[in-house]
């Protein structure tokens, strides 16, 4: 708490500045810190483990993000009012439970609620009970079930790892042998497989800030999962994103709130696993309407970078209200009337094992969010992961935001790096078509 006093008593104000610890090390966490910094009610910011770029916004602490006890120990030691957990792994491992058990407020679901991301079969079960539209699917637990499941769901084949796979566990292909081979590999890793009906249509990521009973949707965004231009090559953790979606049908958010978010929040509460944190609905706008292809239990990366850049409502107060179960007291969210684009700069060989340790120049500019970066002993910024940077820009419209983002990308040098050149291009040029419409 900070006490600000003037010379005269009537000018004395008491400001409670919320101290926040953000867990994670990606561009999503950099974006969270950037948005939290804009909130006048936020005081000291800490991050663990952070990256080379987050140092400018927050005090950095080391932590093993897979270890809930280590996270709670850190939060207790440095004395924070709120912990915001970025990645899914700590949540699935019970970090939010450990923090709540120690009386520390946390924005993030319990391990029980995080199963909505941790197990695709669990998510399907929740959706079936709640009547939420999703792709038909067959669970496969042994090699002899693979062929029948592929025949049932048909081509293009969608084969998913049922466990956490950092966005890379899904194969979508018309090559039946490749689909079967992926299923065999996932089974060999000890996870069940989900084979799904293919859904045609544009994808939408819709985030909702939830407090266990209320889901408050943010702006819909679109991300680009494939590594190459024109949606070619393997799936990645995400190569870029934009918001808002000029092509989205009117009323889309209300429809998803009614058919997806509200029923899921009610079903999770009924199961004794109320969802408090960020519920991420990955949707396909199929000809029959929006259908869920995945849920995540945390902010998406890289969509967060664009959604938060457009958010006017103070983020710290919003997340603190959700953590306290008080979303009913939060008024409608406000947004900047602009468009935002982010382009991910990836290391050589990503999404395969990335080449790391190369010097990056130009990464200190405003709008360059860091992900896989580290500070070398000589103070230079070097690559330290697959997705290295997430360059963001806003503009009056998507074409303008795109132009500014790519100008910034052009000022960054990282040997061997690659990025997509078509992020938000189809949307800016009016080329995104909804199924069933010309
Ligand atoms: P996921 O990790 O479940 O989001 O899947 C990764 C990507 O695979 C998605 O962004 C889609 O592009 C694609 N995908 C997943 N499920 C389906 C589906 N049922 N139909 C069509 N594409 C899908
Ligand atoms: N943008 C995809 C994800 O965060 O899983």
Image (cartoon, rainbow, N blue to C red):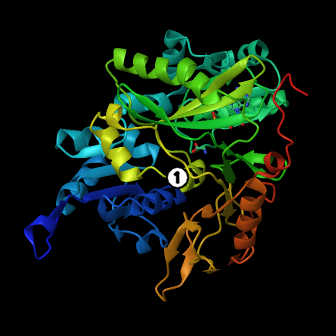
Residue found farthest to the right: 438
Residue that badge 1 annotates: 308
Give the vertical position of 193 relative to 348 (above or below).
Answer: above
Q: Report which quarter residue 249 is drawn in.
A: top right
Location of residue 402 in the rendering, given as x and y in whole percent from the top left corner: 75, 60
Please say whether residue 187 is visible from this viewpoint: no
Give the vertical position of 230 relative to 366 (above or below).
above
| Residue drawn at x 33%, y 64% as measured from the top left | 45
Locate residue 325, reporting x and y percent. Answer: 29, 33
Give the class, few, some or many, for how many residues have Cα within 10 Å of label 1's Cα (few <14, many ≥20): many
Pick the quarter of the image with the N terminus.
bottom left
Instruction: Please tell me which residue is depicted at 54% across the width and 79% down the height of the picture.
Output: 381
Q: Secondary structure at mark 1?
A: helix
Q: How many marks?
A: 1
Q: Nearer the viewer, residue 234 or 56?
A: 56
Residue 129, percent from left and from top = 49, 10
Q: Which residue shows up at 17% across the image and 44% down it?
A: 102
Seen as rendered, the residue at the extreme left is 9
Taking 381 as reference, is 35 left or right?
left
Quarter-wise, where is residue 326 in the image?
top left
Q: Nearer the viewer, residue 145 or 100?
A: 100
Q: Tell me: 329 left or right of 397.
A: left
> Quadrant of the image for the C terminus?
top right
- Ligand 2 positioned in quadrant: top right
Q: Is residue 67 visible?
A: yes
Residue 290 % position (x, y):
67, 23
Q: Would residue 326 be found to the left or right of residue 344 on screen? A: left
């Amino acid at each position: 708490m900070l006490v600000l006093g003037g010379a005269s008593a009537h000018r004395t104000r008491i400001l409670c500045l919320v101290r926040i610890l953000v867990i994670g090390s990606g561009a999503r966490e950099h974006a969270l810190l950037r948005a939290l910094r804009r909130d006048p009610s936020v005081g000291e910011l800490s991050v663990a483990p952070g990256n080379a770029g987050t140092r400018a916004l927050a005090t950095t602490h080391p932590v093993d993000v897979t270890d809930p006890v280590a996270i709670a120990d850190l939060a207790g030691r440095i004395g924070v009012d709120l912990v915001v957990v970025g990645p899914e792994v700590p949540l699935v491992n019970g970090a939010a439970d450990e923090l709540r058990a120690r009386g520390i407020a946390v924005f993030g679901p319990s391990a029980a609620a995080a199963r909505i991301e941790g197990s695709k079969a669990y998510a399907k079960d929740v959706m079936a009970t709640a009547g939420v539209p999703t792709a038909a699917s067959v669970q496969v637990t042994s090699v002899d079930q693979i062929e029948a499941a592929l025949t049932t769901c048909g081509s293009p084949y969608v084969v998913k790892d049922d466990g956490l796979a950092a966005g890379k566990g899904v194969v979508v292909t018309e090559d039946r042998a490749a689909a079967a081979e992926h299923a065999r590999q996932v089974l060999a890793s000890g996870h069940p497989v989900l084979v799904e009906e293919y859904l045609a249509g544009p994808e939408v990521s819709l985030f909702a800030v939830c407090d266990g009973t209320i889901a408050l949707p943010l702006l819909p965004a679109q991300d680009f999962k494939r590594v190459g231009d024109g949606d070619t090559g393997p799936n990645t953790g995400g190569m870029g994103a934009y918001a808002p979606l000029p092509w989205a049908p009117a009323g889309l958010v209300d429809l998803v709130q009614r058919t997806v978010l509200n029923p899921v929040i009610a079903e999770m509460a009924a199961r004794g696993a109320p969802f408090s944190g960020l519920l991420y609905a990955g949707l396909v706008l199929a000809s029959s309407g929006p259908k869920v292809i995945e849920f995540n239990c945390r902010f998406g990366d890289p969509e967060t970078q664009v959604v938060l850049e457009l958010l006017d409502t103070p983020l710290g107060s919003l997340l603190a209200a959700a953590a306290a179960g008080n979303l009913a007291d939060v008024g409608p969210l406000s947004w900047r009337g602009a468009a935002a684009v982010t382009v991910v700069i990836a290391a050589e060989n990503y999404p395969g094992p990335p080449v790391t340790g190369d010097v990056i120049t130009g990464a200190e500019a405003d709008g360059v969010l860091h992900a896989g970066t580290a500070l070398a002993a000589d103070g230079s910024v070097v690559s330290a992961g697959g997705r290295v940077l997430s360059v963001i820009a806003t503009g009056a419209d998507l074409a303008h935001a795109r132009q500014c983002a790519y100008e910034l990308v052009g000022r960054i040098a990282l040997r061997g790096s690659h990025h997509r050149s078509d992020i938000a291009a189809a949307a800016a040029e009016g080329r995104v078509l909804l199924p069933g419409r010309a």
